[in-house]
Image: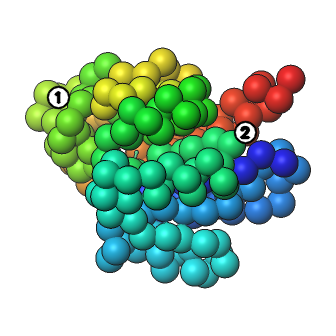
C-alpha cells in the first residue's frame, strides 16, 4: 500500500476527490493533507472525510525540515492539488519523480508564477483560445516545468467566461486526476 500526501491551498475539491477515490483502493491511500492557508475550505472537507489535515507555514516548509520530515515519515507520493507555493529543492531532491502537480491549462501555455486558478482562465479567455485543458506533470524546482504525464482538452466557444472555463476544467480534473495518479503508482510498482 503506497502512501499519498496531498498539498492544497484553497477549496480542496481535488484533494477531496483523491481522498474518496483511494478510500477503498488496494494500491494507495491518502495519509495526510498539508495546507499553507489556515482558512482554506480543504480543512472542512478533510474533517468530513475523517482525513488528517495539517496547517504549515513558510518556516515549516522552507526554513526548517518540519514538512520534509513529515513527508519522509508519511509519503511515498506527493500530490499537489491546487497548491500555490513552489516546492523547495530539498523536497524535490528527496522525492525524485514522486511529486505530481495538476495545472488547469495545457502547459507550456499559461504556466509559471502567478498563473493559478481563475487567473489562468482569464488569460485563456483574453486570448480567445478555442480549447484549453489540464496538465498533470512531475514537479521540479521551477513552476510548471516538470515532465508532462497526461493532458486532456476541452473545447471553448465565444460564450465561455472565465467561470464557465473553470467549470469545464473542474470536470476534467475530477474525471482524470485520481486515475492518472493510480496509473503512475501502479507503473512504478511493476
Ligand atoms: C485547480 O483547478 C487546480 O488545477 C489549480 O487550482 C485549482 C484548485 O482547486 N491549480 C493551479 O492553478 C496550480 N497552478 P481545488 O482547491 O478545488 O482543488
The answer to whether 25 appears left or right of 127 in the picture is right
Q: Are marks 2 and 1 in contact (CB under 8 Å)?
A: no
Of the 4 image quadrants, the one containing the C terminus is top right
Q: Is residue 133 visible?
A: no
Frontmost of labels 2 and 1 is 2
| Residue occupying the point 36% across, 22% down | 145
From mark 2 to mark 1, how far is it between C-alphas?
34 Å
Helix, strand, or loop for circle 2? Answer: helix
x and y percentages locating residue 39 in the rendered image: 32, 76
| Residue occupying the point 14% across, 28% down | 127
Q: Residue furthest left?
A: 126
Which of the two residues, 17 or 171, is positioned nearer the viewer here? Answer: 17
Residue on which the image places disc 2: 182
Residue on which the image places disc 1: 128
Q: Residue furthest front?
A: 64
Is the residue marked by circle 2 packed among few (<14), some (14-19), or many (20+) residues within 10 Å? Answer: some
Label 2 vs 1, first from the N-terminus? 1
Which of the two residues, 10 or 96, is positioned nearer the viewer here? Answer: 96
| Residue occupying the point 38% across, 40% down | 87
Amino acid at each position: 500500500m503506497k502512501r499519498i500526501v496531498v498539498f492544497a491551498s484553497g477549496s480542496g475539491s481535488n484533494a477531496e476527490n483523491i481522498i474518496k477515490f483511494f478510500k477503498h483502493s488496494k494500491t494507495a491511500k491518502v495519509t495526510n493533507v498539508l495546507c499553507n492557508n489556515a482558512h482554506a475550505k480543504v480543512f472542512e472537507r478533510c474533517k468530513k472525510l475523517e482525513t488528517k489535515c495539517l496547517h504549515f507555514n513558510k518556516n515549516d516548509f522552507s526554513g526548517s525540515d518540519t514538512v520534509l520530515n513529515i513527508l519522509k515519515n508519511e509519503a511515498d507520493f506527493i500530490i499537489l492539488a491546487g497548491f500555490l507555493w513552489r516546492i523547495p529543492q530539498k523536497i524535490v531532491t528527496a522525492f525524485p519523480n514522486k511529486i505530481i502537480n495538476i495545472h488547469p491549462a495545457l502547459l507550456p501555455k499559461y504556466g509559471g508564477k502567478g498563473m493559478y486558478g481563475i487567473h489562468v482562465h482569464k488569460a485563456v479567455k483574453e486570448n480567445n483560445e478555442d480549447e484549453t485543458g489540464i496538465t498533470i506533470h512531475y514537479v521540479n524546482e521551477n513552476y510548471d516545468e516538470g515532465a508532462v504525464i497526461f493532458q486532456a482538452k476541452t473545447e471553448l466557444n465565444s460564450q465561455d467566461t472565465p467561470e464557465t472555463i473553470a467549470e469545464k476544467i473542474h470536470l476534467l480534473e475530477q474525471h482524470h486526476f485520481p486515475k492518472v495518479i493510480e496509473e503512475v503508482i501502479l507503473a512504478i510498482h511493476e
